[in-house]
Amino acid sequence: MVIEQNGLTDMAKKPTTKKNTPKKITTPRKITKGGKVAARRKPVKPKALKATSDELKGFYREMLMMRRFEEKAGQMYGMGLIGGFCHLYIGQEAVVTGIQSTLKTGDTILTSYRDHAHMLACKIDPKVIMAELTGRETGISKGKGGSMHMFSVEHGFYGGHGIVAAQVPIGAGLGFAHKYRGTDNVSVVYFGDGAANQGQIYETFNMAELWNLPVIFVIENNQYAMGTAVRRASSEIELHKRGESFRIPGEAVDGMDVLAVREAAARAVDWCRAGNGPMLLEMNTYRYRGHSMSDPAKYRSKEEVQKMRAEHDPIDQVKQRLLEGNIMSEEEMKAIDKEIKTIVAAAAQFAQDSAEPAPHELYTDILVAE
Amino acid sequence: MTIEILLPAMSPTMTEGNLAKWHVKEGDKVAAGDVLAEIETDKATMELETDEDGVVGKIFVPEATESIAVGTVIAVLLEEGETASDVSAAPTIVSASPENKPEIVDVAAPIAQIVTEDDFPEGTTFTSTTVREALRDAMAEEMRLDDDVFIMGEEVAEYEGAYKVTQGLHAEFGDRRVIDTPITEHGFAGLGVGASMAGLRPVVEFMTFNFAMQAIDHIINSAAKTNYMSGGQIRCPIVFRGPNGAASRVGAQHSQNYASWYAHVPGLIVISPYSAADAKGLLKSAIKSQNPVVFLENEMIYGQSFDVPDIADYTVPIGKAKVVRQGSDVTLVSYSIGVKFSLAAAEKLAAEGISAEVIDLRTLRPLDMDTVIASVKKTNRVVCVEEGWVSCSISSEISARLMEDAFDYLDAPVLRVTNADVPMPYAANLEKLAVVTDDQIVEAAKKVCYKAGDN
């Protein structure tokens, strides 16, 4: 790392009469206590992490749960049981599964409105998620939030945010609280490639690095902001570089491979826990379904979607590893499949059987009674 | 010709200053750009530089003099060839053009007396405190009581507040709890909301609420709605505070009153106090609250002194209006600086034999209509007073609620006296025409009492 001279000192000197090419003026970099310019830092890549058999089995099970849950939600939407917007995560399961596996109690996560799988990853009961989707009193937000607005303080899940990118400064605020309280917990903030163009993200990057906040910014680049391809909306499509001018180290990751995700996440988590400030991970992933349930699907070809499913599916990749490593047999997998179907069916039933919120709930939870 | 050095106005609202220190003495030679003296205003201490070369001929105002009017000759410089005998003995005192003086200086002290009467236990002692100091004291006290309370905003730490409201906090609480932010309202408002969701109690200062427009998404979508959307799980104990409404001669983009914008939103508490005691007691209640609070101050009354009770951990309940002057003929309902104009109007009305009751709403959401209606039952006439635009204003809301809930007690239509329905002009004369005045209030009060000239 070449240490550049503080340009301001040069400017203060009186100009000489000699006609020289003007010296390049550089802005001063982050100055350390010794008065020297701090070099940019980034974590060193360790060897690839290998998953134990149990971990691989766990990933398979978790991702399958997300997939089946979302498929069921899609069906229920079609039946008119779920209203409004419903954004499915199908195809992206490896991202949240891999990252969540590196977190510990006290860490917090939050994301946008595509949030069902993130809640399942936080081990929230599928029943209360589904009941929220159907707008029932047993839902996690008592039926008052819906698909896009769910929270669980108990599970470290802070939403569930409906305004594109608004969760990013909020997530930095959670990171601020971790640091303020002197814990080594981290805040993981998920946002999409579309949100990555919002101004408030860059305000947040600046403060997060300036104040050394333990925040992991995760861009879930599923290639389309609603129907707009990344290249049609972003002047720099390598989104992991978006933190560079704030000195936030970034990394591009194969977001379809849960082990690659976990490896990168573990590195980022260590980096943040050690007090090195924020880190940016770009997870290259793919959503199979539409942006929401009312997607015309005219912005991409069926072949493109089919190719991703056939060649990169996150669940198939784990399945392959399990079979090749003789960790699990087809029969065992079928048993897991069946078990998950039962859980999801029970959640769906619960969500339909539960009562709608009582009318008096209209006026509760507006302000906290004091 | 000697050169007179006048005490300059160093901010839009400065009317007087203290001469803290002279950096030169009589006979010193000075060059343009040299620092002559340190001037202390209610907002900051600033260095006074000379624009001219010369010799300090005479110093008229010694250092450590307080409350010198803007425009006072504090010294003279001699130009080449002049001697001290060229200085005329007595300096000409030049006062700031009355046109440019904000309304605020005309009405003053007696009003403060009225506000602090009769609410306190016998034997309560009071300390004269400016609104600015009262706000600072509220924050300092709450920060001492609870480590989760911290303040963030632009220039709140090392600069000690753009309007000096956070003076002394950084020295006492340090970098961890008094945090200078970059100029990124949207970002730091959101960050504050996140910190409050995690259970901290941020006080987010906006340099003015005009700049909070950049952050309004987080105030409304993130702070106000999350408790409801989470079924009561996610608390947002945050205070957004800063000056609101018109300052003086700062034009349309720095002069807006946002009270009705925030008061419109369920999930928010909106407070806008007038007196220093209320500013202190309500800000402490706001910081202790589990709910997001928008706390609207007014730059024009920051420097005004009121009696603040010497009561430990003094709080004022949220959602309670206050009758600040008793009367029987007409009720003037207002908040923030509007209370000042209303009290001045009440004084004028008294001289004309009309007894006006003045209500300071103090909290704008929830509105304390009980206090207003109790007054209406007595006076049967209401004028709403508001330094802000008329459409969809707090005054409009009061009017509508009186129609719904107190129609039978009204003997005259409710009138609204507000600022002109225009972006705030810069020119001194136009600005004066745009802002509500006590004479307009007097006029409206007489009208609802059917005592106006044209009735």
Image (spheres, grey):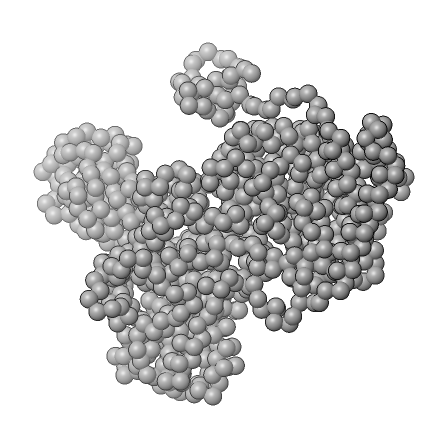
Vertical order, A62 against B270 (above or below): above
In what quadrant of the picture does the N terminus of chain A appear? top right
Q: Position of residue A128 (x, y in %)?
A: 69, 56
Residue B161 visible: yes
Left or right, B190 with reference to B375: right
Left or right, A227 with reference to B376: right
Residue at 34% x, 74% y is B323
Residue at 59% x, 46% y is A156
Q: Quadrant of residue A193?
A: top right
Q: Position of residue A257 (x, y in %)?
A: 76, 32
Left or right, A9 with reference to A342: left
Vertical order, A290 against B3 (above or below): below
Residue at 16% x, 41% y is B63
Q: Position of residue B307 (x, y in %)?
A: 25, 62
Left or right, B208 with reference to A270: left
Q: Quadrant of residue B239?
A: bottom left
